[in-house]
Amino acid sequence: MIRTKKDYIESLKKQKLNVYYKGERVEDVTTHPALIPHINAAAMTYELALRPENEDLMTAASHLTGKKINRFTHIHQSVDDLLKKVLMLRLISHETGSCYQRCVGFDAMNTLYMTTYEIDAAHKTKYFSRFVEFLKMVQEENFMVVGGMTDPKGDRSKRPSEQSDPDLFVHIVEKREDGIVIRGAKAHMTGSVNSHYILIMPTQNMAKGDEAYAVAAAIPLNTPGITLIFGRQSNEERKLEEGIDAGNKEFGVVGGEALIIFDDVFVPWDRVFMCGEIDFSGLLVERFATLHRQNYGGCKGGVSDTIIGATALAAQYQGTANASHIKDKLIEMMHLTETVYAGSVACSAMGSKTKSGAFYPDPLLANCTKHNITRNIYEISRLAHDIAGGIMATLPFDQDLRSPETGKHVRKYLAGVEGVPVESRMKILRLIENMTGGTCLVESMHGAGPPQSQRVMYQRLGNLPQKIKWAKALARINE
Ligand code: SF4
Ligand code: FE
């Protein structure tokens, strides 16, 4: 069983995944400087759970075995569990300032738990009991699971079975007595190079003819036929350097995403949880999206807290902290942060029990939360840039600070408030740069689905006809 960061790293070493970075095979993900920060961040989901003060938030009693488990492997049994998830995410973000990746698999497991139960009731299949066995193993071993939903999708105007290349959506190429063979790819897979299993799911609602694409299954990431290509990030080569320029060297910028290719990968039947049930693919996608959108006020709320702290500190170092417009901008940043957090708390508090017994957040409020993230994080970052000043974008290299020729000039001309070391000023500005640019912002926009996917949910769940009725009644219109 994986308990500590050390156990986690050893487990990753043993797996020997087929990972590529910049065109080259990575022999050991745990020693590659570009991947270490992501491993450090994910390791916090293990380490923080061991601290007694976090026990209530970060562990739970398994409803299957009664044993104490890491909350990231738990199935929500109550509204209280939904709330604890959000509180836990904000807590971890304060320590990492970056994505710790494990929520995607957490949400995928909850999605499959509630949905396989309903598929079985409708189709007389046996997916739920298989899934429960898989879940017990994950809980027992404390594995990290990737939730694999997004397919590359090719021509977005065409359905999976209409694509000229059938592999642009993951699909079943063979059904055998002992299992299925799948082919295709999953894109933007957060934390995948440092996880143990992937839980693939259909990426969208499927129609007649798409049966081979309605597939859900759990696959160890070291299964033959799987290749992971790590994605490029903003300023990622700074992770390879010594010194302060990486900003958040220990935990990185975002989660560490990869493109995962499945080249005729075999999955035994006991790990297949959906196989052709097109009528449940839309519900499955909606549930996964809701469960992941629930998170963002917790995780990004916590990240924003650290951005606010860094920005306030930069202002103190520069002597602007007492200006009223700076104080007001910091207040605005706090307001935007608490607004997204309130959304996560609200959709959890309004959660309800599904037929399987697992609890599910309110979908409209979860979508509202994620939609606010796609805006508020940009505004929080804009205000951080405003307060930090142009120096954040023009700072010399860390090497200039350390060079005997240039160091004296950097120290003299980058001095702020007396007594504040120039290193401290540079470190905090680099941290803000790291947390508010490029890949971080795009992750807030597209992680858990782009803004349009949330607007579609408003269209579906917003109940416009009822709103019109209320207006008519008030205006005394009787036609
Ligand atoms: Fe978890 Fe947030 Fe990362 Fe998503 S972006 S995996 S919710 S930490
Ligand atoms: Fe994300």
Image: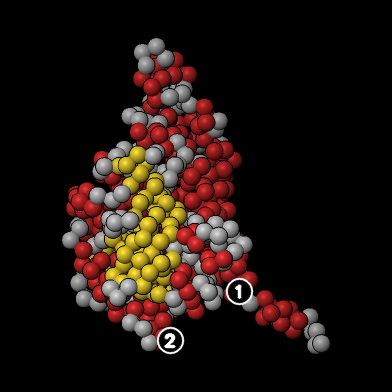
* Label 2 close to label 1 by CB (< 8 Å): no
Report the residue at 31% width, 49% height from top.
18
Position of residue 15 measured from the top left corner of the image (x, y, whole percent): 23, 53
When asked about the image quadrant of residue 266, the answer is: bottom left
Report the residue at 67% width, 76% height from top.
464
Report the residue at 63% width, 77% height from top.
463
When asked about the image quadrant of residue 268, the answer is: bottom left
Q: Amino acid at mark 2?
A: Ala
Query: Quick one: SS at disc 2?
Result: helix
Position of residue 326 measured from the top left corner of the image (x, y, whole percent): 55, 40
288 above or below 475?
above
Local crowd size for mark 2, using a 10 Å CA cut-off: few (<14), some (14–19), many (≥20):
few
For the residues labelled 2 and 1, the Cα–Cα distance comes to 24 Å
Q: Is residue 372 visible?
A: no
Report the residue at 57% width, 48% height from top.
379
When asked about the image quadrant of residue 291, the answer is: bottom left
Position of residue 469 measured from the top left corner of the image (x, y, whole percent): 71, 82
- Is 412 left or right of 91, judged from the image as shown? right
Local crowd size for mark 1, using a 10 Å CA cut-off: few (<14), some (14–19), many (≥20):
few
Q: Is mark 2 within 8 Å of ligand 1?
A: no
Q: Dot 2 corresponds to which residue?
A: 122
Look at the image and tell me in which quarter the N terminus lies: bottom left
The mark found on residue 460 in the picture is 1
302 above or below 412?
below
Q: Amino acid at mark 1?
A: Arg
